[in-house]
């Protein structure tokens, strides 16, 4: 944060706090020697955080619903190792070694939302979409050569990144059609991605281009290179991920999030 942006920054912090109960830990300011310390945040990032939180709140029944669902969230930017960001109940962290996208904000806040409900929202999603988590079945699938991975890890080449149902570290057999999957996919990631897809899909907001790109990549030829997603056997994977008529609202995931934000999903 630049010294000249201090007024703007404090306004954004106040808005985030009063409107959403989101508390950013400010790491900028004047130190004990009277020198300005920039910290890890930029003015743009604060703005992006505020806008993206607003998009997530926008799919809920207003700000109060957001505050109730998340129960207050502290946000930090610090060195968290190899990950871009992470989340738990009431805490979202972004890595100070880089910046973050609007998609990442919504994804991480979706984790915090799930966590605030004892991770039961992702269990409900798994059930609703007809998925299940069964590591032994995953091992069996790998054993008989039906997996698009090696036994204990993915390979970094097209068609071998562990995108098929159950072919991931968790043994997560996703039901219906998620917008993507990889070795780290499990029901928690599924929930966070499903929320981000719902926020972005066909709404002309900061997440919409990415949401569309995630679906459209499956129209590419096998072995084609996508500027965001690299090279893969897109046509081959289309049967797992490409929604009917390219319309993501036709997926069970879209319907699940719709039902969830309308208060029609019972959480056990
Ligand atoms: Zn995640």
Image (cartoon, rainbow, N blue to C red):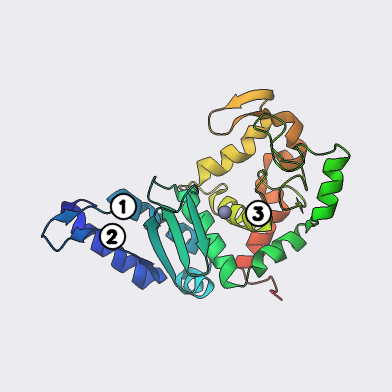
Q: Are marks 2 and 3 in contact (CB under 8 Å)?
A: no
Q: Estimate how packed mark 2 is, as few (under 14), some (14 to 19) or many (20 or more) residues with alpha carbons within 10 Å.
A: some
Q: Are marks 1 and 3 in contact (CB under 8 Å)?
A: no
Horizontally, residue 240 falls left or right of residue 13, namely: right
**Residue 40: numbered disc:** 1
Describe the element under mark 2 as helix, strand or loop.
loop
Quarter assignment of residue 158: top right
Identity of the residue furthest to the front in this view: 152
Q: Nearer the viewer, residue 262 or 103?
A: 103
Describe the element under mark 1 as helix, strand or loop.
loop
On the image, the x and y values in percent for residue 87 come to 51, 61
Q: Estimate how packed mark 3 is, as few (under 14), some (14 to 19) or many (20 or more) residues with alpha carbons within 10 Å.
A: many
Q: What quarter of the picture does the C terminus occupy?
A: bottom right
Up the image or down, 35 lies above or below 222; here it is: below
Q: CA distance from mark 2 to mark 1?
A: 7 Å
Ligand 1 quadrant assignment: bottom right
Q: Label 2: which residue?
A: 27
């Amino acid at each position: 944060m630049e010294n000249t942006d201090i007024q703007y920054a404090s306004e954004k912090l106040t808005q985030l706090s009063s409107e959403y109960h989101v508390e950013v830990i400010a790491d900028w300011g004047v130190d004990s020697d009277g020198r300005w310390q920039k910290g890890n945040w930029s003015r743009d990032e604060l703005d992006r955080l505020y806008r993206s939180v607003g998009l997530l709140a926008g799919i809920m029944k207003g700000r109060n619903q957001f505050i109730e669902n998340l129960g207050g969230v502290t946000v930090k930017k610090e060195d968290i190792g190899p990950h871009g960001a992470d989340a738990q109940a009431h805490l979202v962290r972004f890595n100070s070694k880089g910046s973050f996208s609007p998609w990442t904000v919504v994804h991480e806040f979706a984790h915090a939302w799930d966590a605030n409900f004892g991770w039961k929202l992702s269990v409900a999603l798994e059930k609703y979409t007809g998925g299940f988590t069964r590591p032994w079945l995953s091992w069996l699938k790998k054993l008989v050569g039906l997996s698009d991975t090696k036994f204990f890890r993915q390979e970094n080449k097209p068609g071998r990144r562990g995108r098929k149902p159950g072919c991931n570290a968790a043994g997560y057999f996703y039901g219906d059609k998620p917008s993507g999957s990889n070795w780290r996919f499990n029901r928690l990631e599924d929930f966070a991605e499903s929320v981000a897809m719902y926020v972005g899909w066909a709404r002309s907001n900061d997440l919409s281009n990415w949401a569309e790109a995630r679906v459209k990549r499956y129209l590419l030829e096998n072995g084609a290179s996508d500027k965001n997603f690299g090279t893969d056997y897109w046509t081959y994977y289309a049967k797992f991920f490409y929604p009917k008529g390219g319309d993501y609202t036709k997926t069970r995931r879209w319907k699940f999030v719709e039902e969830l934000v309308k208060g029609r999903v019972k959480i056990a």
